[in-house]
């Protein structure tokens, strides 16, 4: 009994108690949410273009001069939106869903980040190295987010199941 209490205390001391949901899962950090949001930026742009009816096409051309890049980023942003939605559905009664999220969220997010970084570099090469603020900002944020995903212990622990006592 004493050993199990010590294990629970060690587990909870790493992160504050308010970081866990009612089922014992560690909530994703704000930087992961912001990164997922940045990976889904094409969806934000297309919604804003739809809302602004008259200037929607100009807004799309401003952020995505090549329409092909918009479509690719819409497809690449879809898993981020799905993870943002599914992470709140984790629970003991949804074991298959929980396992899917735990097994795939971090690797797929890293792959999407690398692909979007490659698209950004390709866009710069298409413009013969001409600097655009949006491209520079996007590449910097994607590089930072990729490093964050690789090195963050909180992200690693976030996709581990809840603490369960062995025995």
Image: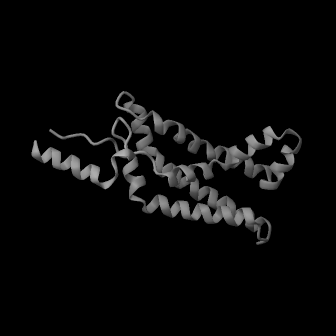
Q: Residue 97 in the image: x percent, y percent?
A: 43, 33
In this view of the protein, which residue sits in the foreground, 40 or 27? 27
Q: Relative to residue 68, is residue 155 drawn left or right?
A: left
- Location of the N terminus (image quadrant): top left
Q: Which residue is rendered at x = 19% and y = 49% of the image?
A: 7
Residue 91: x and y, percent?
38, 33
By what rule are the colours in the image chosen? one colour
Answer whether residue 81 is visible to the viewer in this image: yes
Q: Quadrant of the C terminus?
A: top left
One can see residue 65 in this view: no
- Residue farthest left in this picture: 1
Q: Residue at x 36, y 27 (%)?
A: 93
Residue 108 appears left or right of 166 = right
Q: Is residue 104 left or right of residue 116?
A: left
Q: Residue at x 68, y 59 (%)?
A: 119
Most extreme residue toward the top, as rendered? 93
Residue 45 x, y percent position in the rendering? 73, 47
Q: Would residue 138 appear left or right of 21 to someone viewing this image?
A: right
């Amino acid at each position: 009994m004493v050993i199990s209490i010590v294990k629970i205390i060690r587990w909870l001391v790493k992160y504050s108690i308010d970081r866990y949901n009612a089922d014992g899962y560690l909530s994703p950090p704000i930087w992961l949410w912001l990164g997922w949001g940045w990976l889904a930026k094409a969806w934000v742009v297309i919604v804003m273009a739809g809302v602004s009816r008259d200037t929607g096409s100009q807004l799309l051309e401003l952020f995505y001069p090549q329409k092909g890049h918009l479509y690719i980023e819409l497809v690449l942003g879809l898993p981020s939106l799905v993870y943002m939605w599914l992470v709140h559905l984790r629970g003991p009664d949804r074991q298959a869903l929980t396992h899917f999220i735990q097994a795939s969220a971090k690797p797929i997010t890293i792959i999407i980040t690398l692909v979007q970084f490659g698209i950004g570099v390709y866009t710069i090469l298409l413009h013969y190295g001409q600097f655009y603020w949006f491209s520079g900002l996007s590449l910097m944020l994607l590089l930072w987010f990729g490093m964050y995903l690789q090195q963050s212990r909180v992200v690693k622990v976030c996709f581990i199941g809840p603490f369960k006592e062995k025995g």
